Image (cartoon, rainbow, N blue to C red):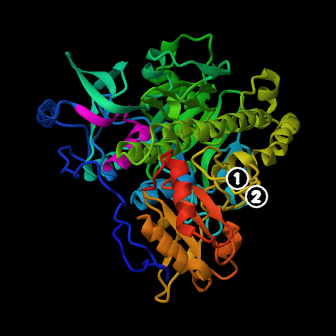
């Protein structure tokens, strides 16, 4: 953001910040096409460019899924010389992950792609909740859970300027890739990567494309190479894992009749329980595309689950033996949970599924991975710019691993609670009776278990309310107010996510505090001490927004929300978490800010 005398959406002053967004290199014009992998000619041109530049990168990202692309996009926006490589020949063709949490949408908002992602996803009138039924067509409706009924503090005016959406992975990845290309970044497909060595200066990585292998160097590596991470295994990074408690088959298909039969229903997902087939139907995007997930019988060989078998299975679940079905792809996946023992090995960092695996119930897998990168990238940038000690990077695992551990426990609990609704129900007598008059007791048991699913659908506190604890935050001697899984309690406590607050200027332009920090440290100050905080921030080359009570939404208060007085302020990190809080104006605000930055960046000097 360029220095301006005032912000555009609220009447608040802003300091100049000459050190902001100091690029590692000039942003370049992208050679890749935004709608797919590179052509052979472009790949050859890039190979020549690599040779001419001695094949050295600031950061090499291994894995071009949503997590790897998100890391690469952030690095490109900041001018880093980064490269992403993906072993697949193209972007994902299977919509594995689909639910995008509001905190992740906030990141997409900052990267300028939130509206595009939302527009490409499931329309809101078809994403009001989940339903349980015996069959899609002429089945017995067992009950539902609507997002609006699930309790907690809803993302919206209170918690966030963004809300969750359902945009499948095969739609999300091209949007991320296009944004990466526009930012001057790159992701090369059909390239496998292996870390072969590292030293005090960087990492040597062997890249294989076709029959050609060459070694490149990178100052740091982010391994976002998925559940079976080859990087994690090659580096001998162990993990703590629970035994897999099942395996599912995901069938990606197109069907006009299935869409037609559910046209008037407001549900994003339908749980199916009957004597013939159990599973779940999930809408995918705006057209006639669906995913059907069902449990794999371990007694069957893997090749038994072909298109013919899967078509028959989903027709039984739908209750329509004549349903038109075009199977697009089939994917087997495991219900499992694990967390890697260490997320850092020298100059190599794990992110996303390479670092943690959750059961799918709650939708934290992809979301947590993208949020991992938001925590890591700003720290890498500061180290690469020489503005922070390498030890700052240790705070990545210190902060994100407890979040992952909590997510695992809650997702396991969600899975256990689902059993009361027929999930993994395999008692033949109960299944045989569920659609008969004698099955009323079974149907009632499922309906009675639905209220316990609220935390799976509305986990606002789990999503927004975690508080980082590391040397990359400055304690103020108070204990944070803890959120529950379902209820988010906004707080300006150091380590907490800086709460959202709407600001409206005299021209009625509205902006969220979420929009005020962008890849840099930022001060939010109360109006009474604003001028002093602005001068202090200006002396350190960082931004300051003075928030006037007259510009906040009636009934809200910056001071009350952040836990400061009118002379107080908070320092917000580039990832949107509070770094330091001063309840009142100290005698030397520049000294307090400078000491906080020195602690966080692990250097004796400030920015």
Q: Which mark is residue 151?
A: 2
Per the rendered image, the range of residues in magenta is 56-76
- Residue 411 lies left or right of residue 28; in this view the side is right
Q: Earlier in the sequence, mark 1 or mark 2?
A: 2
- For the point 70% across and 55% down, the residue is 146
Residue 380 belongs to magenta span: no
Rendered location of residue 90, percent (x, y): 30, 33
* Quadrant housing residue 383: top left
Circle 1 is placed at which residue position? 461
Rendered location of residue 59, percent (x, y): 34, 36
Secondary structure beneath label 1: helix
| Of the pair 441 and 85, the residue shown nearer to us | 85
- Residue 174 lies left or right of residue 476; in this view the side is left
Residue 69 belongs to magenta span: yes
The relative height of residue 126 versus residue 75 in the rendered view (above or below) is below
Q: Is residue 263 visible?
A: no
| Of the pair 540 and 417, the residue shown nearer to us | 540
| Of the pair 352 and 16, the residue shown nearer to us | 16
């Amino acid at each position: 953001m360029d220095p301006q005398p005032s912000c555009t959406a609220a009447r608040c002053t802003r300091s100049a910040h000459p050190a902001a967004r100091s690029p590692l290199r000039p942003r370049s014009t992208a050679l890749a096409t935004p709608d797919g992998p590179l052509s052979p000619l472009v790949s050859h041109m890039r190979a020549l460019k690599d040779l001419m530049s001695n094949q050295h990168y600031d950061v090499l990202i291994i894995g071009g899924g949503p997590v790897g692309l998100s890391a690469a996009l952030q690095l490109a926006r900041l001018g880093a010389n980064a490269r992403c490589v993906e072993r697949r020949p193209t972007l994902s063709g299977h919509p594995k992950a689909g639910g995008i949490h509001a905190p992740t949408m906030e990141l997409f908002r900052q990267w300028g792609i939130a509206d595009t992602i939302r527009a490409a996803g499931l329309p809101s009138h078809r994403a009001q909740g989940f339903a349980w039924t015996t069959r899609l067509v002429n089945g017995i409706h067992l009950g539902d859970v609507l997002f609006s009924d699930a309790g907690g503090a809803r993302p919206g005016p209170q918690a966030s300027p963004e809300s969750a959406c359902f945009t499948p992975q095969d739609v999300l990845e091209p949007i991320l890739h296009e944004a990466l290309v526009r930012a001057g970044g790159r992701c090369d497909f059909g390239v496998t990567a292996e870390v072969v060595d590292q030293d005090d200066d960087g990492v040597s990585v062997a890249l294989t494309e076709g029959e050609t292998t060459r070694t490149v160097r990178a100052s740091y590596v982010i391994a976002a190479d998925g559940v079976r991470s080859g990087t994690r295994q090659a580096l001998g990074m162990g993990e703590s894992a629970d035994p897999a408690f099942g395996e599912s088959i995901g069938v990606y298909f197109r069907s006009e009749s299935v869409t037609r039969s559910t046209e008037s229903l407001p549900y994003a997902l339908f749980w199916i329980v009957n004597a013939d087939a159990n599973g779940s139907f999930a809408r995918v995007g705006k057209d006639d595309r669906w995913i059907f997930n069902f449990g794999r019988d371990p007694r069957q060989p893997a090749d038994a689950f072909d298109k013919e078998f899967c078509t028959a299975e989903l027709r039984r679940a739908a209750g329509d033996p004549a349903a038109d079905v075009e199977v697009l792809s089939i994917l087997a996946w495991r219900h499992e949970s694990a967390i890697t023992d260490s997320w850092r090995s020298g100059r190599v960092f794990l992110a996303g599924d390479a670092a943690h695996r959750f059961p799918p119930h709650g939708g934290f897998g992809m979301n947590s991975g993208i949020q991992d990168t938001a925590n890591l990238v700003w720290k890498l940038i500061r180290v690469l710019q020489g503005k922070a000690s390498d030890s700052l990077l240790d705070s990545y695992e210190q902060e994100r691993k407890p979040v992952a551990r909590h997510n695992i426990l809650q997702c396991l609990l969600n899975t256990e609670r689902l059993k009361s609704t027929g999930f993994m129900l395999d008692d033949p007598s109960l299944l045989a009776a569920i659609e008969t008059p004698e099955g009323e007791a079974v149907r009632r048991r499922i309906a009675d278990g639905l209220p316990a699913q609220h935390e799976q659908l509305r986990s606002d506190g789990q999503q927004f309310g975690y508080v980082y604890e590391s040397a990359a935050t400055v304690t103020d001697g108070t204990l944070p107010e803890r959120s529950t899984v379902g209820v988010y309690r906004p707080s300006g406590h150091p380590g907490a996510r800086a709460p959202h607050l709407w600001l409206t200027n005299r021209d009625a332009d509205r902006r969220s505090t979420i929009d005020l920090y962008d890849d840099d440290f930022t001060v939010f100050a109360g109006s009474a001490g604003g001028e002093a905080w602005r001068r202090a921030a200006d002396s350190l080359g960082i931004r300051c927004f003075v928030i006037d009570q007259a510009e906040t939404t009636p009934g809200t208060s910056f001071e009350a929300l952040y836990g400061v007085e009118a002379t107080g302020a908070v320092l917000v990190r580039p990832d949107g978490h509070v770094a330091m809080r001063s309840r009142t104006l100290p005698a030397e605000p520049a000294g307090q800010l400078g000491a906080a930055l020195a602690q966080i960046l692990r250097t004796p000097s400030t920015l």
